[in-house]
């Protein structure tokens, strides 16, 4: 999960070269609150066990921000 946080930081400060922007996953699991973060991680694990390439957002954030991240990264499912 550290790679997602690192990527978010690089993007935030405009330091991620365009040629390195790759789609890390097909699915983004959102995080609604700190209390539900564990549930989001469990869901991501279940989806991975089912064969999907999944990223769990690294922490609670407003949904529009998480949707924007998924869109920028080319993730088809949220």
Image (spheres, rainbow, N blue to C red):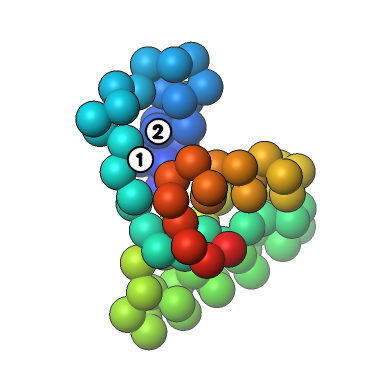
The residue located at (34%, 51%) in the rendering is 24
Q: Which residue lies furthest to the bottom in this view?
A: 50
Which mark is nearer the camera, 1 or 2? 2
**Residue 50 location, x and y as percent?**
37, 84
Q: Quadrant of the C terminus?
A: bottom right
User: In the image, which disc is placed on residue 22?
Assistant: none
- Identify the element where label 1 is drawn: helix
On the image, numbered disc 1 is attached to which residue? 3
Q: How crowded is mark 2: few (under 14 residues within 10 Å), some or many (20 or more)?
A: few
**Residue 33 location, x and y as percent?**
76, 53
- Reply above or below: 8 against 38: above
Real-space Cα distance between discs 1 and 2?
A: 6 Å
**Residue 29 location, x and y as percent?**
56, 62
Residue 22 location, quadrant: top left
Q: Which residue lies furthest to the left in this view?
A: 19
The residue located at (55%, 73%) in the rendering is 43
On the image, numbered disc 2 is attached to which residue? 7
In this picture, residue 19 sits left or right of residue 75:
left
In this picture, residue 18 sits left or right of residue 44:
left
- Reply above or below: 34 against 52: above
């Amino acid at each position: 999960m550290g790679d997602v946080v690192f990527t978010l930081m690089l993007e935030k400060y405009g330091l991620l070269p365009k040629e390195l922007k790759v789609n890390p996953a097909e699915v983004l699991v959102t995080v609604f609150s700190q209390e539900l973060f564990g549930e989001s991680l469990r869901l991501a694990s279940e989806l991975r066990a089912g064969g999907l390439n999944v990223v769990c957002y690294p922490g609670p954030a407003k949904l529009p921000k998480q949707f924007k991240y998924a869109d920028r990264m080319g993730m088809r499912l949220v």
